[in-house]
Image: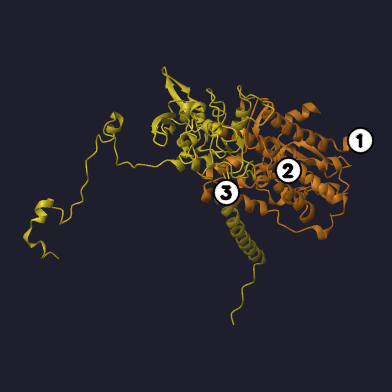
Chain colours: A orange, B yellow
Amino acid sequence: MKNNVLYKNRYLISRRIVQLTILLLYIAGNLYGWKILQGNLSSSKIFDIIPMADPYAVLQLFIAGSLLATDVLIGAVIVLVFYSLIGGRAFCSWVCPINMVTDFANWIRVKTGLHREEWQLRISRKTRYWILGLSLVLSFIIAAPAFEFISPISMLHRGLIFSMGFGWAAVMGVFLFDLFVTKNGWCGHICPLGGFYSLITGPSAIRVKHDADKCTLCMNCKNICPEKQVLWMVGKESVFVTSGECINCARCIEVCNDDALNFGFRYKPQKEEKENA
Amino acid sequence: MEKKAPVDRERRKFFIRVLQGLGLAALGGSIWGGYVSEAKTDEVVLRPPGAVPEEDFVRKCIKCGMCVEACKNRENNPDRTKQTATLRLAAPGDHRPKEKGKYIYPKQVAIGTPYFVPREIPCYMCEDIPCVPPCPTGALDPELVSSVKEGKKTLDINKARMGVAVVDMEHCIAYWGLQCDACYRACPLIDEAIKLELRRNPRTGRHAFLLPVVYPDVCTGCGLCEHACVTEKPAIFVLPRELALGRVGKHYIKGWEKEEEQRIKGSKGIQKTITPKSEKSPEEYLNIEDLLDEK
């Protein structure tokens, strides 16, 4: 049972299901007028009541100098609170459509041996924070949301829901970049939206927990992790992965054969633990 | 010889990194910023009803497409399975019209923002304006398309000012003397936004011109006229009001209109700048004997 392919990929499969379901619900919102999810990842409504908005996009609009309506502000707060206090950077691995593109590029990379060092252009993982900062400065100077004009994420997402136009070119760019230039290049190094979520999701409750006592130091987790630096504690300390850069994709949990990594709830009160035990 | 202070390698490395980052940011920022400032506005783009002025629109619109969805899924949409929605979200490369050179087409609509091309699909002026209330950011402002009816604020599509229809008198066949009133009949505000004006046709001496004339104060810019126009490239077309209309300036006041006259109330009249020359009245000044001796 535990070596079953489905079980070994349980989180990966769940993630694909969640990503595709969200995408299809958005598409149905436009095509058939379904009210479950309307709009797109920039701003949307659940069941025509609960607003959601991309907090990074809202921040850009705000810096560009617009006074926004309350709807979008509430939406941004809802999303902000959810990811920063509960879900972590789960947007990147469970929602973002580009994740499927970059994961596909990475999969080919591994399968075809492009994994080797000569296929790796070293880029600092801090680049995304520079781009994040730059996008805000530009939004202010140009009085328009700078990243929203070039975001391949929005282009792909809008393209699938509304019309693609040449948006596929940007998506292809990300794909080829991740395939030939740098492993996890876009999501782990460049994307300012990922950088934004990295900065705000530090306190989130749902976290991967490492058990150093069970760890056999096989390093499977570090090999598969798209943000290796967050797994510094593997084999050393039994602590939660607390870095905001962890995207909660749970690949490390799946590849661990020693049950040394698992999801945990960081702020679990002591009382509850006793009751469960 | 002074002894050199030991090099703080970490600090040096930090400064190098920061300066390299700044260099890259300056290079990338100028390309990125250059692109965005070019691509953020299009002069001839037509926005949904209730849109705030274009400059504000690009910084308020979050590109969620809720207006487009509302337009597509509105009740009076004849066929939801086909592309019959007026509004569309600008996609990259959207600037190429289906029929090149046959009508006015925006060149670079800010990516992801809603717009419409009346020659393809005009705005059908739904009375309940489904596209405006869903807007989460206020880029489409219900206030701009509301009027007070029986003490209640209600949505009023006739207040929309998406653009203004302009007639090209040279190519409008009604101005040739042919009988065509396609735009006039298509206009949802017939006899208000477009009126037919009669004029004698001196060429034949026995016929009348029936000339469509647009009244910009009433025209909503829905584009039903442009859609209906029979010429190959429409001789009546909608342009953004900012582009098509002039501006008089504040110093003109329509003295025959009550509301306009209110504007002079409380005015201090003409403000004079007193200089040594203008101290005296003009006549007095001209009659000064030593005018020529003046410095």
* Mark in the foreground, 1 or 3: 3
Rounded to the nearest whole Å, what is the CA distance between mark 3 and mark 2? 24 Å
Find residue A234 and report its horizontal and vertical position in percent: 81, 48
Say the numbered circle drawn on residue A2.
1
Residue B56's spot in the image, x, y percent? Answer: 49, 41
Q: Are marks 1 and 2 in contact (CB under 8 Å)?
A: no
Residue A208 rendering spot, x and y as whole percentages: 77, 40
> Element under label 2?
helix
Q: Which residue shows up at 84% across the image and 41% down it?
A: A260
- Residue A124: image quadrant is bottom right
Q: Can residue A1 be seen?
A: yes
Mark 1 to mark 3: distance in Å?
Answer: 53 Å
Q: Kindly identify the amino acid type of the residue bearing the numbered disc 1.
A: Lys
Residue indicated by mark 3: B39
Q: Amino acid at mark 3?
A: Ala
Residue sticking out furthest to the bottom: B1
Left or right? Give the position of A185 relative to B293: right
Residue type at tag 2:
Ile
**Label 3: element kind:** helix
**Circles 1, 3 touching at the beta carbon (< 8 Å):** no
Label of residue A52 in the image: none
According to the image, label 2 marks what residue?
Answer: A98
Q: Chain of mark 2?
A: A
Q: Residue at x 81, y 36 (%)?
A: A11
Residue at 40% over, 42% down: B246
The chain holding disc 3 is: B
Q: Which badge, 1 or 2, is on the more N-terminal residue?
A: 1
Task: Verify CB contact (< 8 Å) between mark 3 and mark 2.
Answer: no
Up-down relation of residue B91 to residue B197 (above or below): below
The image quarter containing residue A47 is top right
Q: Is residue A232 visible?
A: no
